[in-house]
């Protein structure tokens, strides 16, 4: 659990986690049903809660692809704080986003 999640009430945190987990799992399941060379362009919009700014909206454009080892994501995220270019990988046995490997380059406008 990170610092930002600790500021949320338990029920809201569970609700957000469940929502994002279901959407993410559905996307992974859809990719897994296709051939292993499948690539899916994705536009995503998200929000995260911060102690100073209650809601931070994020928008991004990315590409998801899958092979026999797992799911990969290459993307760019834009927010009021700046932008980030990200590469991420998740193996199929564990679909939790944070359990995968992540490598990113980011520029923050403000702390």
Image (cartoon, rainbow, N blue to C red):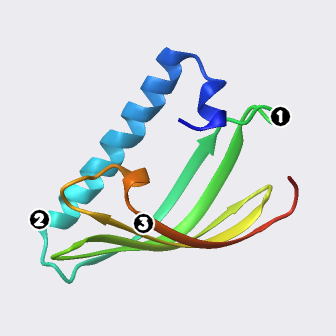
User: Are dots 1 and 2 in contact, CB under 8 Å?
Assistant: no
Distance from disc 2 to disc 3, alpha carbons, whole Å, reads 23 Å
Which numbered dot is residue 33? Answer: 2
Q: In the visual, does 81 lie left or right of 78?
A: right
Mark whose residue sits in front, 3 or 1:
3
Q: Toward the viewer: 47 or 99?
A: 99
Mark 2, residues whose alpha carbon is within 10 Å: few (<14), some, or many (≥20)? few
Q: Residue at x 11, y 65 (%)?
A: 33
Q: Position of residue 64 (x, y in %)?
A: 36, 72
Q: Outermost residue toward the right?
A: 110
Distance from disc 3 to disc 1, alpha carbons, whole Å, reads 28 Å
Q: Toward the viewer: 102 or 17?
A: 102
Question: As displayed, is residue 87 above or below residue 4?
Answer: below
User: Are dots 2 and 3 in contact, CB under 8 Å?
Assistant: no
User: Are dots 3 and 1 in contact, CB under 8 Å?
Assistant: no
Q: Position of residue 1 (x, y in %)?
A: 53, 35
Q: N-terminal of the two: label 1 or label 2?
A: 2
Q: In the visual, does 101 lie left or right of 61?
A: left
Distance from disc 1 to disc 2, alpha carbons, whole Å, reads 42 Å
Q: Which residue is mark 3?
A: 101
Question: As displayed, is residue 59 above or below residue 83?
Answer: above
Q: N-terminal of the two: label 3 or label 1?
A: 1
> Under tag 2, what secondary structure?
helix
Q: N-terminal of the two: label 2 or label 3?
A: 2
> Under tag 3, what secondary structure?
strand
The image quadrant of residue 41 is bottom left
Q: Which residue is mark 1?
A: 52
The image quadrant of residue 61 is bottom right
């Amino acid at each position: 659990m990170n610092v930002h999640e600790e500021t949320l009430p338990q029920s809201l945190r569970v609700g957000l986690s469940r929502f994002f987990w279901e959407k993410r799992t559905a996307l992974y399941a859809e990719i897994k049903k296709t051939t292993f060379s499948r690539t899916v362009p994705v536009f995503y919009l998200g929000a995260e809660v911060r102690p100073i700014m209650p809601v931070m909206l994020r928008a991004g454009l990315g590409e998801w692809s899958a092979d026999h080892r797992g799911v990969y994501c290459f993307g760019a995220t834009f927010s009021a704080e700046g932008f980030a270019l990200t590469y991420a990988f998740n193996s199929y046995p564990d679909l939790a986003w944070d359990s995968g490997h992540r490598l990113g380059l980011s520029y923050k406008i403000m702390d």
